[in-house]
Image (cartoon, helix red, strand yellow):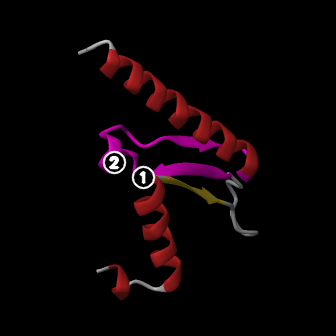
Amino acid sequence: MISKLDPKEQSVGAMIDRVGWMFVHVTPSVDDRAHCWFSYTWGLAVMFGWPELIRLDLGRNIAGEMLNAAVREIKQRARSCRLQACN
């Protein structure tokens, strides 16, 4: 199925296959009155059963660092919980 996608879509699929998730950053257009940047995760719900995350009004680098840190922390807590037999 991935071969039916355009190159950009294939790169998204490849990233999620390799890492399990990714984040997407959306920038406002010049004509956008709201002028709001946002970033969101893609793949957390399917790969880990977690809700997707969204971060508003931050640039790509800062939002990416925050989302990456949040996913690392969630993974660590899930791993610790499994080791301690949490419910």
Q: Quadrant of the C terminus?
A: top left
Counting residues from the start of the chain, the first of labels 1 and 2 encountered is: 1
Residue under label 2, please give it. Answer: 47
Where is residue 62 drawn, in percent x and y? 74, 43
Identify whether 75 is placed above or below 40: above
Report whether residue 56 is seen: yes
Disc 1 marks which amino acid?
Gly
53 within the magenta span? yes
Q: Is residue 84 left or right of residue 7?
A: left
Residue at the spot x=53%, y=43% of the render? 54
Q: Residue at x 69, y 62 (%)?
A: 28
Looking at the image, residue 23 sits to the left or right of residue 78; the answer is right
Q: Which residue is mark 1?
A: 20
| Relative image position of residue 84 (x, y in whole percent) | 32, 12
Q: How many marks?
A: 2
The answer to which of 65 and 77 lies nearer the viewer is 77
- Quadrant position of residue 86: top left
| Element type at mark 1 | loop
| Residue type beneath disc 2 | Met
Give, as a single range, the part of the protein colored magenta: 37-60
- Would residue 46 be counted in the magenta stretch? yes
